[in-house]
Image (cartoon, rainbow, N blue to C red):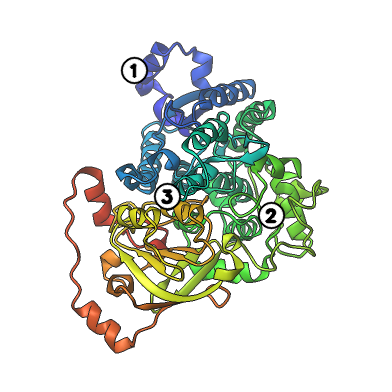
Amino acid sequence: MRSDKMKKGLERAPHRSLFKALGLTDEEIERPMIGIANSANEVIPGHLHLHQISEAVKAGIRMAGGTPFEFFTIGICDGIVMGHEGMKYSLSSRELIADSIESMAMAYPFDGLVLIPNCDKIIPGMLMAAARLNIPTILISGGPMLAGEFQGKEIDLITVFEWIGKVKVGEMTLDELKEAEGCACPGVGSCAGMFTANSMNCLSEVLGMSLPYNGTIPAVFADRIRLAKESGIQIMELVKKDVLPSQILTPKAFENAVTVDMAFGGSTNTSLHLPAIAKEAGFKLSLNTFNQISDKTPHLCNLSPGGPHHLQDLHRAGGIPALMAELSRGGLIRLEALTVTGKKVRENIKGKKIHNPEVVRPIGNPYHTTGGLAVLFGNLAPEGAVVKRSAVDDAMLKHRGPARVFNSEEEALKAILNGKIKKGEVVIIRYEGPKGGPGMREMLAPTSAIVGVGRDRDVALLTDGRFSGGSRGAAIGHISPEAAEGGPLAAVRNGDQIEIDIPGKKLNLLISDEELKKRLSQWKPPKKELKGYLKRYASLVQSAHTGAVFKE
């Protein structure tokens, strides 16, 4: 066993003594040792209950003859850090999480790992560590939050963000907004729509790193506890058979993940995280792959923020297995990919059916004939930009308008809420990329404000930052190279005409090549005084098209 390095033989008597100080018996020390990376904390609703998930995992491990060792990682909630300096630490925390798990699993050579995340950057950070370490690993998340209800209508966190704009334009009172605050998030779990956390929890299932239904069983269901116990039992089987992440996280698995992502219209952040995980697995997943798969994948689910349904609806409709089974009817799923069940995808989805054809539409009757995300290229985004096509109003799929340039999220948000943005304008928010922010802040507050003040059908927003999975409208992010690296976004001036063609996958600044080159030659990077982790992060991180990974 891998753990023999720290427990077996004459020379390890002191080590065994320290394990006995934990209260372990000789028999427990002799068993396979399983590390449990838990991101439980009392700050994030999605993580408040993860101690309960961990206890169930431990029970499963012990039932199957192993000895669990729990340790903890940090966790940052994008919803709570949205719109202020704290958001700079969200994406950047992904690397810290991966590094911390690597550190623990190398310092203590566990025989296997169980990962317990639930929100935003914690899921990909843990999967990056799994790929890097390449020891038997399984992921079990805390599960999605139930949708809230306000005046007979289902709502979620994004509803509250958008209704701030309604208060600003007089369509809602402060008292009504306060009432909605208390209804939108009814309890524990990752926020109820197909936002970043739920997109990544569902895709961990598609990648084969978690058991079926991990992405959709609501946090408060007893099924979630049973799944945690089954995950604890299954990690022992993976250890016994030496099934490694390198056998699961293959190009086939990532093709499946991008395909399902397109079918359920996931967060644009998946185009950051899947390439970052793939890099740790030893290969490149380019943005062109997203476009190639999107062009042939129908959009079958219309979940919040683009549509009316939530994760609880997707679960009742058959979950990810039913969605994959439907996609397989069109030959769109790589059925031979291995999963942590010990079986191939083909076996996992055999006989699975859709129970609600509105939540998961049949492949012959999609919401859209192409996938939920699109990657745009042009002289404004030579390395690409990403948009959640399924959440864009038809009126904005093609747009041309004058630029309104802002050098920070705060400047732009103030202008939007004060009614300073005119019909047809293209709002530019730059110097918010991985290096420029630093940390590539999400722009949920500006996009929600645009929706709230009724401008989502005639105003676009472009940024080298990123968007929440809850953003909707013509919100185009991840523009690469970013402005802080001298990308073309740095050369845009107020009044410049911007051309957006989402069906054609084009994003262009309508000035001559000579003028663009001249402007960039005169550009000087803005100076920011940084310290601590963000200073180190900014010195290492690359633009979004790489997955915002560190330089080698």
**Label 2, label 3: how many angstroms apart (C-alpha)?**
25 Å
Please state which of the two labelled residues, at mark 3 or mark 1, is closer to the viewer. 3
Kindly state the secondary structure of the residue where label 2 is placed: loop
Q: Nearer the viewer, residue 524 or 447?
A: 447
Residue identified by numbered label 2: 301
Residue 27 position within the rendered picture, expressed as x and y whole percent measured from the top left: 53, 15
Q: Is residue 435 above or below residue 521?
A: above
Q: Name the kind of residue labelled 3 in the image.
A: Ala
Neighbourhood count class around disc 3 (C-alpha, 10 Å): few under 14, some 14–19, many 20 upward: many
Q: Are marks 2 and 3 in contact (CB under 8 Å)?
A: no
Kindly state the secondary structure of the residue where label 3 is placed: helix
Residue 255 position within the rendered picture, expressed as x and y whole percent measured from the top left: 60, 61
Residue 238 position within the rendered picture, expressed as x and y whole percent measured from the top left: 61, 38
Residue identified by numbered label 1: 14
Q: Nearer the viewer, residue 31 or 396?
A: 396
Residue identified by numbered label 3: 445
